[in-house]
């Protein structure tokens, strides 16, 4: 009986060693045959050996042989499952490839362009002022020398909220708000949104941006106006640009001038140019010497002080700077367009 027990122990040790080395399904099959084959498997012989024992020895050793058989069957079964269940295939990743770039978004082209304009004036010593987009009739018109029935009001199709409240049609009311609060010297620009009752078309929008400028001090002349605007436009459009001042009219400046630049599209070479209409010039901003009446309206003595002012449309200027044929592109939010201008 002892002999048979030792034999079972030894078979178990050998079996454990054999399955530790198994590397594929074939090898499992071989071990299975070795132990479980009906004809020549070790277990079959162990069961045969049982018959040689005395009847009282049989239950204990028989139990051992049975346990060993179950052990072998279970082990082989779980090994087989290990080999046959598909393992997750690890994708090969090339860690040296550049990662996928995420588009983080960027400031809107008009904001970027506005900042470019601001920076030129900030370098000249201007500071930035702001005012409300909902204005009173007084600031938008009257203080700027447009009396109630003045025909110049017709130049703006105004969006009224009440008889006295409106969406500002230009940034010029900020001139008044600044001069009411601060005495000269004044040197400010005011970028901001303005509103007009317009149907959108390639050169008009009901909402757009302007940058207003105002300088008031002792001894300010038209030469300062001209020098400042020339420097600004040459910096924005680069040295080569041609500039001209053309007499004009605004109620709040006297004299007034509109400033044109040489056409950036045809350089004055095409009689059929759709941008300049063949004239070779495009109007870029309005300007003038602050009307003495406007200074009086804010209690600044026009005998002592003088000033100049100007206003330019940001989208319009951006169109010429980047040769964009339609102002509406800025607000259609087509990412192919917007991304052209994004900060890389
Ligand atoms: N506010 C004028 C407009 O919207 C532009 C303008 C013209 C502003 C002359 C000025 C100026 O400050 O002096 O058309």
Image: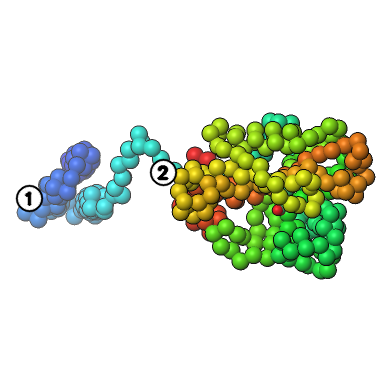
> Mark 2 highlights which residue?
100
On the image, the x and y values in percent for residue 264 come to 51, 44
Q: Nearer the viewer, residue 226 or 329?
A: 226
Image spot of residue 93 (x, y percent): 33, 40
Residue 35 seen in this snapshot: no
Q: What quarter of the picture does the N terminus occupy?
A: top left
Asked if residue 300 lies left or right of residue 206, the reply is right
Element carrying mark 1: loop
Decide if residue 172 is on the left or right side of residue 23.
Answer: right
Which residue extends farthest left?
Answer: 39
Q: Nearer the viewer, mark 2 or mark 1?
A: 2
Residue depicted at 75% across the width and 44% down the height = 288
Mark 2 residue crowding within 10 angstroms, few (<14) / some (14–19) / many (20+): few
| Res. 323 mark | none
Residue 248 image point, x, y percent: 71, 50
Between 16 and 180, which is closer to the camera in this rendering? 180
**Residue at 61 percent of width and 48 percent of height:** 283
Q: Give the residue drawn at x 53%, y 34%.
A: 240
Task: Give the camera-side residue of 206 and 145.
Answer: 145
Q: Percent from the top left, x then y, of residue 213?
A: 74, 42
Q: Nearer the viewer, residue 108 or 31?
A: 108
Which residue is denoted by mark 1 in the rendering?
A: 40
């Amino acid at each position: 009986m002892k002999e048979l027990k030792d034999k079972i122990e030894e078979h178990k040790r050998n079996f454990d060693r054999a399955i530790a080395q198994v590397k594929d399904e074939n090898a499992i099959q071989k071990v299975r045959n070795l132990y479980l084959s009906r004809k020549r498997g070790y277990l079959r012989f162990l069961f045969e050996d049982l018959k040689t024992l005395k009847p009282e020895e049989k239950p204990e050793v028989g139990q051992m042989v049975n346990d060993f058989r179950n052990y072998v069957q279970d082990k082989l079964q779980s090994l087989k499952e290990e080999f046959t269940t598909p393992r997750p295939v690890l994708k090969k990743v090339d860690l040296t490839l550049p990662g996928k770039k995420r588009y983080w978004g960027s400031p809107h082209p008009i904001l970027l362009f506005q900042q470019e304009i601001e920076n030129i004036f900030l370098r000249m010593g201007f500071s930035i002022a702001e005012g409300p987009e909902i204005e009173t009739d007084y600031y938008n018109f009257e203080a700027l020398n447009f009396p109630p029935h003045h025909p110049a009001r017709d130049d703006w199709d105004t969006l009224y909220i009440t008889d006295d409240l409106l969406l500002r049609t230009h940034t010029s009311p900020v001139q008044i708000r600044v001069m009411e609060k601060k005495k000269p010297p004044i040197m400010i620009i005011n970028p901001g949104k303005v509103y007009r009752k317009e149907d959108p078309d390639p050169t008009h929008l009901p909402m757009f941006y302007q940058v207003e400028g105002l300088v008031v001090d002792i001894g300010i002349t038209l030469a300062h106006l001209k020098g400042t605007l020339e420097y600004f436009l040459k910096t924005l459009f680069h040295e080569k640009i041609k500039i001209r001042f053309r007499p004009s009219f605004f109620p709040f400046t006297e004299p007034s001038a509109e400033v044109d630049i040489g056409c950036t599209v045809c350089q004055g070479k095409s009689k059929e140019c759709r941008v300049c209409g063949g004239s070779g010039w495009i109007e870029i901003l309005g300007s003038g010497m602050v009307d003495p009446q406007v200074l009086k309206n804010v209690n600044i003595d026009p005998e002592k002080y003088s000033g100049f002012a100007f206003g330019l449309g940001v989208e319009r200027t951006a169109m010429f700077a980047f040769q964009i044929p339609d102002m509406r592109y800025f607000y259609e939010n087509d990412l192919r367009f917007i991304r052209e201008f994004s900060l890389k």
